Amino acid sequence: MLRCAMLLFGLIVCHEAHAQQASQIPWDDPQLALKLPQEMRKKYYNFTNPGSCVQCSIGMCGMDQNVPAAAYLLEQSEYGAPVFHGSNPSRVAKYCKDRNIRVYNVTGSKTWDWMRWACNTGRACAIGAGGSHFQTLAGYIPPKGDEPAHWIVCNNNGDQKYQDYSEAAFRRLHLASGQWCVILDYPPSPAPGRLVEWWK
């Protein structure tokens, strides 16, 4: 019985390993919509603010897009008291209205088009991802030739590294939480500066 249980556990772990992998894409890659170094992403660690994964995800987008009212959701600030614990679409709508944060608060089957639009226009978005959990969609890389599409996600429950999901694995991840995403209605962040040896 124990051997059977261990075999089943091994199969589950193996399956999950194939479903996602740590992304090798650097934080400032132009293909990404979220361009925050890992040190800045760690500010939005959900275990520091238990049950606040929605605010962690929106806050990360706020930091990236220079929207302080969203970036400081988890802190006492001039925009209001910290917002902790679980949220649903109506709670997000209320605190965004209270803080004058413009958002697209999308539920249902249209989230897929909105998530692609956000990434294609340089905006990260907060998304339902995993059972009763929210994460930050950092980028969508469309298929090219034989190369399949990739969805790049930052999990605020983990080490804040980017995770690379296949189309099928990402679909399972998003559906597990329910189709809901929050996109800040502000311009995307500018591309990070790069040193160029212009004299060569």
Image (tube, grey):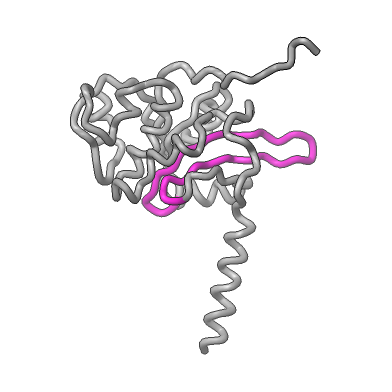
User: In the image, is residue 36 part of the stretch drawn in magenta?
Assistant: no
Q: What stretch is highlighted in magenta?
A: 130-158
Quarter of the rendering occupied by the C terminus: top right
**106 shown above or below 1:** above
Q: Residue 24 lies in what quarter of the image?
A: top right
Residue at the outermost bottom position: 1
74 sits to left or right of 140? left
Which residue is the extreme one toward the front?
Answer: 199
Report the residue at 42% width, 41% height from top: 42
Instruction: Look at 41% across and 50% down and name the residue there.
Output: 157
Residue lying at the far top in this picture: please name it. Answer: 199
The answer to whether one can see residue 167 in this image is no
- x and y percent of residue 115 in the render? 51, 32
> Quadrant location of residue 103?
top left
**Which of the two residues, 70 or 8, is positioned nearer the viewer here?**
70
Q: Quick one: 20 or 144, which is closer to the camera? A: 20
Foreground pick, 4 / 164? 164
Say whether residue 146 is magenta.
yes
From the top left corner, tell me how far across and down residue 178 is, in percent. 41, 46
